[in-house]
């Protein structure tokens, strides 16, 4: 029987990854800034998994009071810890929490506990997740304001069900991805609805491997046991 692996650092050259910036980092920073603007009186923001730190600097530049949390000290977070156990933070300490491409790095038994913690520490949340497979996108932007037509097709084995206990995807970093059996959009919305009101779910047209959830916390949620 496969044991449950505890949350840990990414199995990559993290120093090299920390130094690298990609177009997706800039796109993601813009969408996080844009989505935070949906929340009223939002100033205190927790970023779980700050990565290379671009989003942190952008949000600080725009006047947000930003705290960062990461399990890996390589990324120089303000606080070292895991998203599944954030007892160092009090209830509603933040107006919003951002977890962008973080939760898929956790074995499934830690997923509900992490959602409960995200809901507990902040009034609102942005959770961005990777979409499985390869993506074919056709997009029409004729240059007229408001016209942006996009057709996006994902190609992968929709029948595949990950066991959630083995990091078999994205070079051994992901335990699951959106679209796989048990992790389709409706499954994730149902899972998140125990902790959040789902305000919006949308595909990032400018970085199509990302599905973005905009959420409002339902209140303090008991952490699921492991």
Image (cartoon, grey):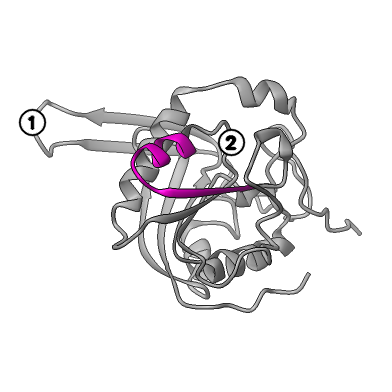
Observer-nearest residue: 216 or 1?
A: 216
Residue behind mark 2 = 51
Residue behind mark 1 = 144
Quadrant hosting residue 148: top left
Magenta region: which residues? 55-69
Q: Residue furthest left?
A: 144
Q: Residue placed at 71% from the left, 53% from the top?
A: 81
| Residue 44 shows in this picture | yes
Q: Secondary structure at mark 1?
A: loop
For mark 2, does the 10 Å Cα neighbourhood hold few (<14), some (14 to 19), or many (20 or more) residues?
A: many
Quadrant hosting residue 165: bottom right
Q: Is residue 212 left or right of residue 84?
A: left
For mark 1, does the 10 Å Cα neighbourhood hold few (<14), some (14 to 19), or many (20 or more) residues?
A: few
Q: Secondary structure at mark 2?
A: loop
Q: Residue placed at 36% from the left, 41% from the top?
A: 31
Q: Are marks 1 and 2 in contact (CB under 8 Å)?
A: no
For marks 1 and 2, the one nearer the N-term is 2
Residue 75, position in %: x, y? 65, 35
């Amino acid at each position: 029987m496969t044991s449950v692996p505890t949350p840990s650092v990414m199995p990559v050259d993290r120093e090299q990854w920390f130094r690298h910036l990609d177009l997706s980092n800039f796109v993601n920073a813009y969408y996080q800034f844009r989505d935070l603007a949906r929340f009223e009186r939002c100033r205190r923001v927790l970023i779980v998994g700050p990565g290379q730190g671009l989003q942190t600097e952008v949000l600080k530049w725009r006047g947000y009071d930003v705290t960062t949390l990461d399990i890996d000290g390589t990324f120089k977070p303000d606080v070292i810890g895991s998203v599944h156990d954030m007892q160092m933070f009090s209830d509603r300490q933040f107006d919003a929490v951002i977890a962008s491409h973080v939760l898929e790095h956790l074995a499934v038994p830690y997923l509900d506990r992490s959602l409960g913690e995200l809901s507990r520490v902040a009034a609102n949340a942005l959770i961005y997740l990777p979409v499985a497979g390869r993506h074919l996108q056709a997009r029409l932007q004729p240059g007229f304001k408001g016209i942006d037509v996009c057709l996006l097709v994902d190609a992968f084995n929709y029948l595949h069900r990950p066991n959630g206990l083995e990091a078999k995807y994205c070079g051994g970093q992901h335990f699951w991805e959106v679209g796989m059996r048990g992790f389709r959009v409706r499954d994730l919305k149902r899972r998140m609805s125990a902790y959040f009101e789902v305000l919006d779910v949308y595909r990032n047209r400018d970085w199509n491997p990302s599905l973005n959830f905009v959420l409002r916390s339902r209140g303090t949620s008991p952490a699921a046991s492991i």
